[in-house]
Amino acid sequence: MGKRYEVRLSGEGGQGLILAGVILAEAAAIYDDKNAIQTQSYGPEARGGACKSEVIISEDDIDYPKATHIDLLLALTQEACDRYAGELRKEGILIVDSFAVERIPEDQFNVFRFPIIETARDEIGKTIVANIVALGAIVALSGIVSLGAMEKALMARVPKGTEDLNHRALIAGFEMAAKAKEGLEARFSPGREGGV
Amino acid sequence: MAEKAFTISPPPEHHWYSFVNEKYRLGMLLILEELSRLRTIQDNFVLVGGLSLLLWGRLQHQVLWDVDLLFKDKFSILKFLALPKDPQLDVVSLEDAFADSETIISFHTAWGFNARWVNLDYLARGNWYYFHKTTVDRQGDFEEKVEWEGREIHIKLPVAFPWDMFIEKSLSPRLENDLSSVNDLSYDLRHVFILFEQEKENPQFWQYIRKKAEEFSRLLELKQRLLWIFGQRARLGYGHIAVADSVIRQIEGWDH
């Protein structure tokens, strides 16, 4: 991966998307020895509670730190999906929460619907780890950082005693996405849709 | 400079910049040097946040550090933004406009020397600028000369002091949200517990934060927040940190 890869994490305040962006960038820069920058923007658009975090990852130097051509978009709310899907590049990856996002704009995306928030709440037992479930899905679908690097970056940030819970959240997201990806590979052309 | 009110612990065995990722180390040093130069032209900010704790040797772990500059108000930020910067430095605004909420004004940028980008955030938050500035004026700047590949990098900056950061982080609205949602990945909470572990046996620390919070008219709020944090620490992932009954009783006695 020489070229830059741009990830946008979007949803609403309180979903931990900025922290998720930070962990993704740290996995890439500190543990996978790539170049990365994480940026967050509130701006006037944030006044409705919207929130977005962007991460640019590259093996080469990053000559410009703002996302211009999104390769992967995570949308945890309908508003975020409506607002940002148009900036996703053709054949890019769109990951949405399958309960929070009902309408997907028609375009040439690879769409993945996962019960991210439900998994965090019901399977892991803590809604706040939806961001970590989403990170697992991003790793599985994009391969932009290794799972090992992501595990190290996550473990470096969690307090003693919560490692297992956070790790389970990461793996739950990873496995759900890996399964969906496996089922879809070699079956569809761009514009395909998958999920669980 | 007036006599110092308290003494910062000796620097750690590992120097602060060993906890800045190698790829970003020189860039961070050059940014701090540039800020030191700009500060001689316009002395209107205090460096706050996690990086301040790293510089004072209080944090010893590696993350992607960003630079948070705290100003008095939006006008002060605009004045600083207008200063001509080092021609070798690239500055990119990440937002089209200031984010202006009830509790904070912020403007996010990225600064880079040789395509090694570091986030630099401009902040203004009530009277927190004066909260930090009064201590920095009394204690003095963070100052250091670093030899790097044959050149000397001189850093001299107003950097928030760890005990003040303990108060600010404990009272931050962001931490309140983290506590409400039981967010064990909260970095404010992590910093609060790291500082608590370092200082919990130090009576000067407790005297200082009580006095400072009282002067700032936030003592009761700090009392409630610390009791909340310590009372909920097991749920928040910090059950392994011992909080003595004497500490709780002491905080409960803050009645002004």
Image (cartoon, grey):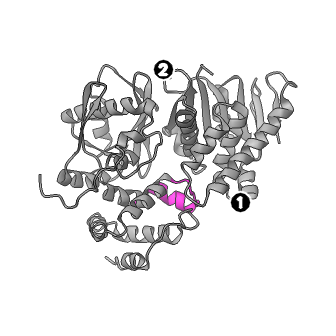
Residue B5 horizontal side relative to residue B171, left or right? left
The number of numbered discs placed on residues in the rendered structure image is 2
- The residue carrying mark 2 is A63
How many residues crowd around disc 1 within 10 Å: few (fewer than 14), some, or many (20 or more)?
Answer: few
Q: Which residues are magenta?
A: B171-186
Q: Position of residue A46 (x, y in %)?
A: 53, 42
* Residue drawn at x 34%, y 53% as measured from the top left: B126
Residue B143 appears in view:
yes
Q: Quadrant of residue B33?
A: top left
* Residue drawn at x 56%, y 68% as measured from the top left: B234
Q: Quadrant of residue B215?
A: bottom left
Secondary structure beneath label 2: loop
Front one among B33 and B256: B33
| Looking at the image, residue B233 lies above or below residue A185 | below
- The residue carrying mark 1 is A125
Q: Answer whether residue B175 is magenta in the image.
A: yes
Front one among A11 and A93: A93
